[in-house]
Amino acid sequence: MKKASLEARHISLSYGPTEVLRDINLKIEPGEFFALLGPSGSGKSTLLRLIAGFNQHQRGELLVDGQDITGVPPHARNIGLVFQSYALWPHMNVWDNVAFGLVERRETRDAIRRKVAAALELVGLSDYARRRPGQLSGGQQQRVALARTVVVEPRLLLLDEPLSNLDKNLRVQMRDELKRLQRQLGLTTIFVTHDQEEAMTTADRMAVLDGGVLQQVGSATGLFDEPVNRFVAGFVGTANLLEGRIEAVDEDGAIRFDAQGIGPLRLPASALAAAPPAPAPGPAALSFRPHQVLLQAPAEPTDAGRVWLDGTVEGAEFLGEFSRYRLRVGQAVVVADQAHYAGHPVLEEGSFVRVGIAPAQVRFLAA
Ligand code: ADP
């Protein structure tokens, strides 16, 4: 199938006085599997519906393969949208549901037979053609909805929270399935999700939205390793954020950071810390991941490659693969995940520990 590109340029949309999308700029490459990720109310569905043509932006341009489609009605866009609810016809069997769009387009009987059979085969439902949607599982219904959408060969495929109606086990299974289908179809696909794990495991790249503002675009590892602000750091994975002030960046690239409630720290230069936005003197947060923190007993010798702080265990949760500790460090709180091995006891509340932070794994986020 043909792969289209999509570009949003300075798109803004308001409902009355409420700005729901603010100056969105985004480029999605042909064949990409792209996620719109954000918390509830961040504007994801509004943006998806805008691409489908059901919402109209007041400012900006929306381009498919370089052509502005602003004002083109939904049916003339040739963009397929799979609704969260699947929206199948309950009184029609699977075959007729899938054939519906082709019949509407007055395709020949032969073409319809060929295309519906191919679409059902693609989603693995050839044997279910005579069933009604009500006689199918949630996962199967979703596959029918997909088949029905791709059978008319859209330029772009849009999926609204594609996995949210499925139970947890099926969701994980359908993640792989969806990826396989997308690869097989090669269709540029954009899906909406509020679930960071879902976005990270399925999408090639994703855009993180908050409050109608696009925060950052990147791959899962790109966003996780190099978040540009506090929101992305906390939304894509878990982050420790120590607020404070960058006092100076030394000649050798080391950063002098005065952490609120902890005191001055000097962190040697690291590529991660220096990635854009480059640290500069002023208010900032020191950001690092819980699993990158190393805990040691106060008496153990500490390795010189880390910055070591004194901490007290305030809370401990045993999660099987790892234990998650909430540590009091000065006036601040640090979360640390420690891999669990048989025979290693979980640290008790009130224990004193040395908290080791790896300078190569920290980021500085400007205010
Ligand atoms: P998300 O998909 O990220 O949960 P939405 O795009 O559905 O977010 O909504 C974004 C914001 O726009 C929300 O604050 C919502 O209340 C508001 N909104 C959505 N649709 C309408 C509408 N038709 N009229 C007024 N406000 C709306």
Image (cartoon, grey):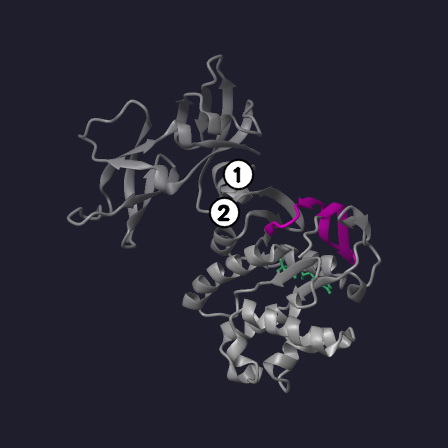
Mark 2 Cα-neighbour bin, 10 Å: few <14, some 14–19, many ≥20: many
> Depth check: 358 or 128 in front?
128
Q: Which residue corresponds to the image point at 48% horizontal and 60% vertical from the top-left?
A: 175
Q: Dominant secondary structure of the magenta stretch?
A: strand
Numbered marks: total:
2
The residue lying toward the viewer, choosing from 323 and 94, is 94
Q: State the residue lying farthest toward the left.
A: 343
Q: Quadrant of the C terminus?
A: top right
The percent position of residue 262, horizontal first and vertical second, equals 39, 30
Q: Residue furthest bottom?
A: 91
Which residue, given by chain and number where applicable, does mark 2 sit on?
A: 236
Q: Position of residue 122 (x, y in %)?
A: 55, 67
Q: Is residue 173 left or right of residue 319?
A: right
Q: Amino acid at mark 1?
A: Pro
Q: Position of residue 142 (x, y in %)?
A: 56, 71
Of the numbered discs in the image, which one, if any, rests on residue 227? Answer: 1
Ligand 1 quadrant assignment: bottom right
Q: Secondary structure at mark 2?
A: loop
Q: Is residue 316 visible from the viewing direction of this image?
A: no
Q: Residues within 10 Å of mark 1 (few under 14, many from 20)?
A: many
The answer to whether residue 268 is left or right of residue 235 is: left
Residue 107 forms part of the magenta stretch: no
Q: Magenta includes 25?
A: yes
Q: Which residues, given as a range, are shown in magenta?
A: 6-33
Q: What's under tag 2, amino acid-wise?
A: Val
Pointer 1 residue Cβ closer than 8 Å to ligand 1: no
